[in-house]
Image (cartoon, rainbow, N blue to C red):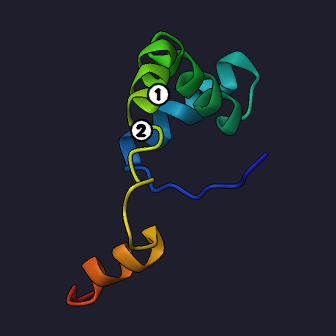
Amino acid sequence: MKRTQIYLDKEVSILLTRESEILHKTVSEIIRDSIREKFKSNSHSLREHVNSVFGIWKNRKIAPETYVRKLRKDRKI
């Protein structure tokens, strides 16, 4: 499992805490279940999109990492 940090506004945090108490689940479990449910119906569509771009970079003469660095070079953080 990969650990990820997210920021929640106060209202969402309260809702998740209440739901956690009602369902006797951790907030993390509720978030994971919600994400799975959200993307379950989209998995076929996501797979189609991934397959449609597979190999799109193969004829490029520049490495993807170099290309991204070049794009971000002038970006101010």
Q: Which amino acid does label 2 sit on?
A: Val
Q: In this view, does 13 lie above or below 62?
A: above
| Camera-nearest residue between 58 and 24 | 58
In this view, the residue farthest toward the top is 41
Sort mark 2 into few (<14), some (14-19) or many (20+) by Cα contacts within 10 Å: few
Left or right, residue 10 beside residue 36: left
Secondary-structure class at tag 2: helix
Which of marks 1 and 2 precedes in the sequence?
Answer: 2
What is the tally of numbered marks visible in this picture? 2
Residue beneath label 1, please? 51
2 vs 1, front mark: 1
Residue at 39% in and 73% down: 62
Residue beneath label 2, please? 12
Residue at 27% in and 89% down: 73
Q: Position of residue 28 (x, y in %)?
A: 67, 38
Q: Position of residue 61 (x, y in %)?
A: 38, 70
Q: Where is residue 38 in the image (x, y as percent from the top left)?
A: 47, 19
Give the image quarter of residue 70: bottom left
Residue at 37% in and 50% down: 9
Q: Position of residue 75 (x, y in %)?
A: 22, 85
Left or right, residue 34 beside residue 52: right
Name the quadrant of the N terminus: top right
| Camera-nearest residue between 9 and 63 | 63
Q: Which amino acid does label 1 sit on?
A: Asn
